[in-house]
């Protein structure tokens, strides 16, 4: 019992300190002190969990289940919203859904239609348009959009833009330009995608040892992230390592 009491006291202190540190007020501190177990549970589920990575993963899982049960539901909803109110926000949201569905021509048409008037240099839309152009195979056009984006705001999502730029240059056959961008991302990009794509390019250029080092880095640091999208890069890197071993 004494151990449980000490443990409960530590939990209380932790939650109370969190409430004070994050500016959530004395009300929560009193609730945590006066009703230790209930107060801590309430604080966690009302204040901590909604902002946590677990909550984001839960929302993503729920969204994925919804799409699996009704794959075109979100597209229909976005289409209806844009038909009722053709605001830029609604049209961009519809374009995003088209992009996710692989409807690249339609996404490009919508994004370009939103780049007008005060939104002519909207960085978020330009970035999405560049992605759509790349996925549609319009590599030269994607590069032009990226130049336009960087002229509008060179600091906008810098690492993601640089990764996209590297992919576009790679698709255009400019290996040296793509490598320069990948090298610049090596210690700055959060996640494994840039290293994996860098490794693929190095492998294609015959620089097998350097490619292997990047794939091994991903494999070695795989446990640092439980995010499913990151684990996909881990699986791909391990597949490359296994393929190299099999052909050695």
Image: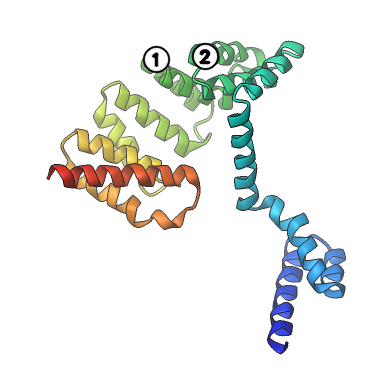
> What percent of the width, then of the height, locates residue 224?
44, 57
The crowd level at tag 2 (other Cα within 10 Å; few <14, some 14-19, many 20+) is many
Q: Is residue 80 left or right of residue 179?
A: right
In the rendered structure, the answer to whether residue 58 lies left or right of residue 15 reads left
Q: Which residue is mark 1?
A: 138
Residue 68, by quadrant, is: top right
The one of 100 and 3 positioned closer to us in this rendering: 3
Q: Quadrant of the N terminus?
A: bottom right
The dot on residue 108 is 2
Specify the farthest residue to the left. 248
Residue in the picture at 72% in, 15% down? 80
Q: How far from the left and from the top, in percent, is residue 99?
A: 53, 21
Q: How far apart are the alpha carbons under marks 1 and 2?
A: 10 Å
Q: Which mark is residue 107?
A: none
Q: Quadrant of residue 5?
A: bottom right
Q: Earlier in the sequence, mark 1 or mark 2?
A: 2
Residue 10 visible to an observer of this rendering? yes
- Mark 2: which secondary structure? helix
Looking at the rendered image, the quarter that the C terminus falls into is top left
* 246, 102: nearer the viewer: 246
**Residue 195 visible in image:** no
Above or below, 233 relative to 43: above
| Of the pair 221 and 76, the residue shown nearer to us | 76
Front residue of 240/70: it is 70
- Look at 53% across and 22% down and name the residue there: 101
Percent of width and height locating residue 227: 50, 48
Extreme-front residue of the structure? 69
Pointers 1 and 2 in contact (CB under 8 A)? yes
On the rendered structure, is 198 left or right of 45?
A: left
Above or below: residue 179 compared with residue 219: above
Indicate whether 134 appears above or below 231.
Answer: above
Residue at the (27%, 37%) spot, across then down: 200
């Amino acid at each position: 019992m004494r151990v449980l009491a000490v443990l409960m006291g530590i939990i209380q202190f932790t939650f109370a300190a969190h409430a004070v540190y994050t500016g959530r007020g004395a009300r929560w501190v009193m609730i945590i002190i006066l009703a230790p177990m209930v107060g801590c549970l309430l604080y966690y589920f009302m204040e901590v969990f909604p902002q946590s990575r677990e909550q984001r993963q839960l929302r993503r899982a729920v969204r994925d289940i919804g799409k699996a049960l009704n794959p075109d539901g979100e597209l229909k909803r976005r289409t209806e919203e844009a038909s009722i109110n053709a605001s830029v926000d609604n049209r961009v949201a519809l374009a995003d859904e088209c992009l996710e569905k692989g409807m690249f021509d339609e996404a490009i048409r919508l994004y370009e239609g939103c780049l007008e008037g005060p939104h002519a240099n909207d960085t978020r839309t330009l970035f999405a348009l560049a992605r759509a152009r790349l996925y549609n195979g319009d590599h030269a056009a994607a590069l032009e959009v990226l130049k336009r984006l960087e002229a509008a705001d060179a600091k906008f999502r810098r690492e993601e833009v640089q990764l996209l730029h590297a992919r576009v240059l790679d698709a255009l056959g400019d290996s040296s330009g793509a490598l320069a961008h990948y090298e610049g991302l090596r210690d700055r990009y959060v996640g494994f995608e840039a290293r994996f794509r860098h490794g693929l390019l190095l492998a294609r250029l015959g620089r097998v040892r350097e490619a292997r080092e990047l794939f091994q880095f991903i494999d070695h640091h795989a446990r640092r992230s439980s995010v499913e999208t990151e684990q996909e890069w881990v699986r791909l890197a391990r597949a490359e390592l296994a393929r190299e071993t099999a052909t050695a």
